[in-house]
Image (tube, coloured by chain):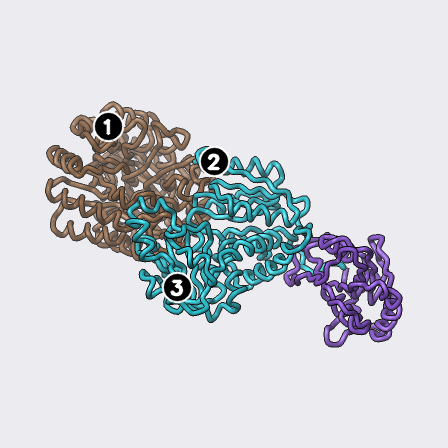
Amino acid sequence: MTAVVDIETAMARMVEQLHPMLKRRPLMVGIHTGGVWVAERLHTMLELAEPLGTLDISFYRDDFTRIGMNPQVRTSHLPVNVEDRHLILVDDVLHTGRTIRAALNEIFDYGRPASVALACLIERGGRELPIEPQVVGEHVKLGKNQHVKLLGPEKLELRIQEVNG
Amino acid sequence: MGLVIKGGHLIDPAHGVDGKKDLFVDDAGFVAGVGKAPAGFKAGKTIEARGRIVCPGLVDLRARLREPGLEHKATIESEVRAAVAAGITTLCCPPDTYPVIDTPAMAQMIQSRAWRFELAFIHPLGALTQGLEGKRLTDMEALDEAGCVGFTNALAPITDTLVLRRAMEYAATLDLTVFLHAEDPWLRNSGCVHEGESGTRLGLPGIPEAAETVAVARDLALIEQTGCRAHFCGLSSARAVAMLAEAQKQGLPVSADVTAHHLHLTEHDIGDFNTQCHVRPPLRGSQDRKGLRKALKTGVIGAICSDHQPHEPDAKLAPFAQSEPGISGLGTLLPLTLRLVDEKLLTLPEAIALLTHKPAEIIGVDTGHLGVGATADICLFDPEARWILTEDKLVSRGHNTPFQGQEFRGRITHTLIGGKLVFNLDSAN
Amino acid sequence: MKPGLQFDDAGRLRHLLTIEGLSRQTILEILDTAESFLSVGEREIKKVPLLRGKTVVNLFFESSTRTRTTFEIAAKRLSADVINLNVSVSSTSKGETLLDTIRNLEAMHTDLFVVRHAESGAAHMIARHLPAHAHIINAGDGRHAHPTQGLLDVFTIRRYKGEFNKLKVAIVGDILHSRVARSQIHALNALGVAELRVIAPKTLLPTAVEKLGVRPYTRMEEGLDGVDVIMMLRLQRERMQGALIPSEQEYFNLYGLTPEKLALTAKDAIVMHPGPMNRGLEIDSAVADGPQSVILPQVTYGIAVRMAVMALIMGGSAEPAGGRR
């Protein structure tokens, strides 16, 4: 089933919330895979000068010993030094907060940023860690057995699936 | 009071017997009649043998009992028990015990210890050189008197060709048989597998075929020169067997045996370093196995032996080259030979001949046949019984066999020594 | 075909004992993972927390500072605790001692053993006796296998040459005693190189080597003709003793890689060596330090490849991938 979320509207909402932050010359960093797609669009819409950073948090996941390596690990790439910079971390869906925890850990292995703000397209509740977004495209209420996935990258589309168990 | 083995299928290749015949054993333990009871025979005991093959007790030309010297691996008692459970009533033990069988006292000691258990007969092979050092000859006449049925340096090489020549000449003087392990020590070097595809793949140092053929060529030249009667132990390569066939054709007094496992396994059975397949000489290629089988059929090879080498488990728990070579083979001698019948290589009487009177002739011992007057060393087996070789079925103390888990057809049910029942499968279970 | 000792029931790689039997897909997965780890070495903090709390024991029965060090760096970059044990061969000439050593370490709850041993098959034997939770990486067993070296070599080739199916590769030197050569051969054949050659005098070529899927050559002039990749092997100086080669001088004349011999290969051929090199014995310094040499990058890539292998064999139970976000 396709969600009732309009991506363009949500994206516009994010741009609006991000605008006040621009005077601090933030660096934008997207989390693989969906977060990078969202970040690429925001990066263009906000006309940021410095290149977009990408993170693959596979090496930082807390469930590695249970589920093992992601067979399609991508390379993390932070083209600009993060030291003392203001960062906007972008992901597609914020759920438990564990991905963000891993991403923060990884960012700090590159250096010590001045601040990190979190921007997500979809906020769906179900947090397991004290992590809250500063920028949200859309809040969605979902059941425990519902799974939301962003499809892309040409045309972004949200898909909500029922998962068993 | 005598014993009658009734209703069985008697196979006695030495006398061309192959059919349903009762066998009569007198109270002194000798065969008294075949097919019909001799006059005045009174059967005190009967063994019901319907559906069984009745044949002479098996003669195994090479089995290490590990006593004296390596009792942590096995003892004479444990291994003669394993022998009779496998239908083997006579076996030869090589002289590479600790101490070496190079004195009459040692030869007698082993026989008398074996005889205490009244199970299988043990015939020692005497050392060809003192301490198997390849330097000085042993007192062969005295050893012969003490019961040695042949002379060998076992796996210890005689590198000095002159010593070998003199040993052969001396043995020929006394009309004794020399048992030879054809293996050039330099070409063998530190090898532990056949030099071929598997060894190359596994990165294990190989023993080339030439290690055997070079030694066979040298030995045959000396046999021709000295006129000595010789027996090659456990040939492993097709080429060596072909050389032997040629020598036999020229009338040289040479015989040979092959181990049961070399007739079935090849270098490829080593798989990923299965130390149970570490044997010496090594398992060779499939062409070699074919050559060995052919030589068996044509009579160039006159006996199948177990080359029994029981080990404690730790001996095989090591990287391949550091593991100890050898298979605990008593229990599989008959089943592996019967497989050759199933595979249509041999007839059943041919197979039994290779385990009975033919090896007996090689050691010159009057056994391995069931003519009237012969010692009643007999085994009975169920040729149709299917069974799987599991650890609990291994009677030998050595459980080192690559055949564990395999299914076999044909199982020993009774073994008699001198007319006395020494193994009965029903009571063993 | 049976999956073999290095896979679990679900067909996942649990140990790395040999490249033989690994599918092209598995090898590529290792190489792709290694690509991602390569960047970790370029960061401010060269560490990721994947193996935090895990214990890795480098168990070296044969001394090799270089290989041990790269495994140590790889494990530390994955945040594992690393213990180095150099067990002198004299105290473990018996196999039971080898098993005893492993059992002792097991009792200390080791998660991964990296084992180097002078005997072929040592890693297989240990793998057969490990408890289910423990893993083993073969860091070289006798003449048999050195799988991480083979993997880092194909990783290097892929980085410089791209696709394998058009490449002609020659492995030069002591093939007979070389575990590196055997692992390279299995890896390159699994990846489908166009042609794989081995070049050595007959004394250093194993019997039936063509059964491994290589074309043997005894003369450099013929074997090097038009190849894209030359993989040199280290010649142990003690080979002079066993009548395998007459002298260093003659070996270098016939099989040493000199600029003249290098000229026989494809114009942009790369030169590799597993190290440590015997300059002037198997390779001329002008070649080793020349523009076609990729010997130093091999070392760098070795760490990323070993990180990838450790991460792949130690991660996860048999649960399907996916997980929570």
Q: Which chain is brown?
A: B
Rendering colour (chain C): cyan
- Residue C88, which numbered label? 2
Q: Residue at x 32, y 37 (%)?
A: B63
The x and y percentages for residue B159 are 22, 38
Alpha carbon distance from label 3 to label 1: 63 Å
Judge the density around disc 1: few (<14), some (14-19), many (≥20) Cα neighbours within 10 Å.
Answer: many
Q: Is residue B133 visible?
A: yes
Which quadrant holds the N terminus of chain A? bottom right
Q: For the residue labelled by badge 1, is the local secondary structure a helix, a strand or a loop?
A: loop
In the image, taking residue B134 as reference, residue A87 lies left or right, namely right
Rendering colour (chain A): purple
Q: Amino acid at mark 3?
A: Leu
Q: Residue at x 74, y 63 (%)?
A: A31
Q: Which quadrant of the structure image shows residue B88? A: top left
Q: Amino acid at mark 2?
A: Ser
* Residues at circles 2 and 1 in contact by the CB criterion of under 8 Å: no
Q: Is residue B369 visible?
A: no
Q: State which chain disc 2 sits on.
A: C
Residue projecting furthest to the top:
B105
The mark lying in front, picked from 2 and 3, is 3
Q: Residue at x 70, y 63 (%)?
A: A79
- Residue C262, which numbered label? 3
Question: How many tags in the picture?
Answer: 3
The x and y percentages for residue B370 are 24, 40
Can you identify the residue that label 1 sits on?
A: B102
Q: Amino acid at mark 1?
A: Asp
Q: Is residue B386 above or below residue B118?
A: below
